[in-house]
Amino acid sequence: MSTVSTEIQGDIAVVTVNNPPVNALSHSVRAGLSDAMKILSANDAVKAVVIACEGRTFIAGADIREFGKPMQEPHLPDVVNEIEAMEKPVVAAIHGTALGGGLEVALSCHYRVALTSAKIGLPEVKLGILPGAGGTQRLPRIAGPANALDAIISGRHVSAKEAKSWGVLDELVEDDLLAAAIACAKEATSKGPRRTGEIEIDGSAFGDEFFAGFRKSIARQTRGYFAPERCVQCVEAAVKLPLAEGLKRERELFYECAQNPQSRALQHMFFAERQVSRIPGIDKDTPRRAIKKVGIIGAGTMGGGIAMNFANVGIPVTLLEVQQEALDRGLGVVRKNYERSAAKGKLTAEQVEGLMSQFTGTLSYDDLSDCDLIIEAVFETMEIKKKVFTELDRVAKDGAILASNTSYLDVNEIAACTKRPEDVLGLHFFSPANVMRLLEIVRADKTAPDVLATCVDLAKAIRKVGVVAGVCHGFIGNRMLSPYGREASLAVIEGAKPEEVDAALFNFGMPMGPMTMSDMAGVDIGYLNRQGMGRENYETKAYDWVDRLVEQGRKGLKVGKGIYTYAEGDRTPQPDPAVMAIVEEESAKLGIERKSIPAEDIVERCMMALINEGAKILGEGKAYRASDIDVVYVNGYGYPPYRGGPMHYADSIGLEKVYAKICAFAETFGPRWWQPAPLLKELAEAGKSFADYDRENAG
Ligand code: 3HC
Ligand code: NAI
């Protein structure tokens, strides 16, 4: 079936794109549009043209699946130029999302009519590229350079209302889009074409100073990214150069971005995030359970934030605590969070009250008897968790899903204390739970398929990216964090300063270094964990210096001193000579001759530790795919998306090299912590990548 068809209604031709699911500009669509323009140009009976789309959306962009493959003619920039050059007026009829190449097609049309619910955007930057079919030249002409920079650098979806105020959309309608577009086309027959590319930009307010200021304003948000600077250069070209030269510059910079490894990494993330909800053994026919009411146990750091996710999408929540005071405190924090959003203008006072009315507080388990899903977020102790689940087993209705937010504990053991282990699983949120996008969905041995399927859907409903993990200590993310932290801490005892370790990993692209992260989380948390583990079960060399800090009351940011010192009311970590004195003493005690460690070595050891643990998790079947691990690390731990997550990063280095490096570390530092993952060895020896593993194993 053809993806582009033409129907002539009187003297108006309606060209319709039908390329499910999102009408991407695959080769057949580009060719179809180009052919239609040629045919309609030559048809004297046709006075104007409408370009519309079938299905859920207007064209949502170039076909990302074609990226990296040899591009077949006609190329999109040529098709877009061909549309703009039409002598007959062309009208775009926009519903859903006109994104990327889709918006570029719309901008090359002479008039644009849209549904009020439509959105437009140039999200290319999120894929590591830039709008490569004239978007960087035409959007500044029609919307002004400032709005264009905002849209191109953020990649955000702009509402139809805002787009109209920018001049991008001519007319908004509530319904019957096609009729409105045809009416616009009829009217345009007397006005003739109106080409975006011919608009002159008044560049007087957009000199070098403007662009320097803009670059400064985005420096933090775009740190480490390759494409944003090229996007700015394109808009500069739009201001300074005639269209044809600007388009040429756009093309050059587009290729620079497309050839940069960041674009492959970001495109990998795009598909990885869409892949996570594909679970072997589960499909659309797997039954789902209805989740209309949720119970949360524990209103501490996590419970309140978890509850907010449900209230935000209109699902009422009952919050249970042991004491009224704790309940009041928990609900107070929730209210404060909403009020903070209101102060920023994101919510109205009525909306805050509406959201708060979704919450019911209780001290009685019996009030949870009508909940469809109950999530436990109490202290991280097996004994307490078991007590809670025993109570839940008593009060929860048949078919209710029982979940634990545990960070490390064995979900099988928790499930086993109920008479309904098939209804139990882990739902591991990340802190702050109302903000962080990641949700680890921990599938226990007996979790029923419909329970898992329901929670995978639920993750999407509460706007999280839900990744399924198997039961193991720390699941995917926290399990990998442990060897990463170990290597960072070892670097300090061997000779690096904490701030050097942090700087090395920050410069790699992490949002903060591991030492700052420890201080933020509380250095005492790891300390207490180690006390429970016994010295034979962890690398004491790495942590004795940290434990001495805790024993001196240096518990981290919350008390103003930890690995760093903090001035009153200031979260900036300040290196402290007292900490270095302890570190040096501990190094001497261990007979370590301290020496400086190059930043690349610190990064390499931390990354290899992450990758090796990731490969073990994958080999043990605790993650379905390597790309799921990447999604966890990017969304839960701030791993730089432009490196595509640790497993994609490993692929970009080459697994043979990674394996050789880990074997070399085993030689140098001893095999105890550097045993290469069997799967890594297998893939490296077969000359394969983690991506190959995913293709062959996860479908
Ligand atoms: N190319 C190929 N496939 C695409 C695609 C694209 N541009 N956009 C979406 N898809 C696929 C998805 O992979 C998914 O496939 P699957 O069902 O097999 O997993 C399917 O379409 C549905 O996508 P979503 O699950 O994301 O559906 P939503 O309804 O949640 O979202 C959307 C729809 C808002 C259009 C979202 O898919 C999206 O943001 N897509 C990307 C848009 C984009 O980045 N466009 C720019 C492309 S680059 C470009 O145009 C370059 C040009 O300047 C030269
Ligand atoms: P928290 O100490 O801030 O809150 C726990 C709350 O549970 C307290 O308010 C306490 O009064 C309440 N509580 C204790 N026993 C209870 C019981 N029997 N019945 C009802 N309420 C009870 O702890 P936090 O940080 O919220 O952690 C909760 C769980 O979430 C733990 O399992 C933790 O490992 C996990 N988690 C924590 C993260 C974090 O960053 N804090 C991140 C992800 C998971």
Image (cartoon, rainbow, N blue to C red):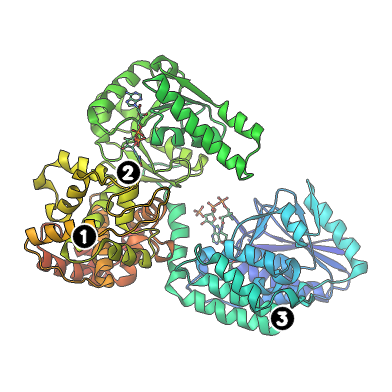
Q: Secondary structure at mark 1?
A: helix
Q: As displayed, is residue 82 above or below residue 397?
A: below
> Badge 3 local density, few (<14 within 10 Å), some, or many (20+)?
many
Residue 357 drawn at (x, y percent): 58, 25
Q: Is residue 63 visible?
A: no
Residue type at the position of mark 3: Leu
Q: Which residue is mark 1?
A: 580
Residue type at the position of mark 1: Met
Quadrant of the rendering where the N terminus is positioned: bottom right
Q: Which residue is mark 2?
A: 559
Residue 391 drawn at (x, y percent): 32, 18
Q: Secondary structure at mark 3?
A: helix
Give the Cα distance between marks 3 and 2: 59 Å
- Which residue is pictured at 42% across the width and 72% down the height? 261
Residue type at the position of mark 2: Val
In the figure, is residue 160 to the left or right of 561? right
In the figure, is residue 503 to the left or right of 49? left
Q: Earlier in the sequence, mark 3 or mark 2?
A: 3
Residue in the foreground of this view, choosing between 562 and 659? 562
Q: As displayed, is residue 269 above or below residue 47?
A: above
Give the Cα distance between marks 1 and 3: 59 Å
Residue in the foreground of this view, choosing between 87 and 680? 680
Residue 102 drawn at (x, y percent): 65, 64
- Which residue is pictured at 36% across the width and 54% down the height? 633
- Which residue is pictured at 35% across the width and 56% down the height? 573
Question: Which label lies toward us, 1 or 3?
Answer: 1
Q: Which residue is mark 3?
A: 243
> Badge 2 local density, few (<14 within 10 Å), some, or many (20+)?
some
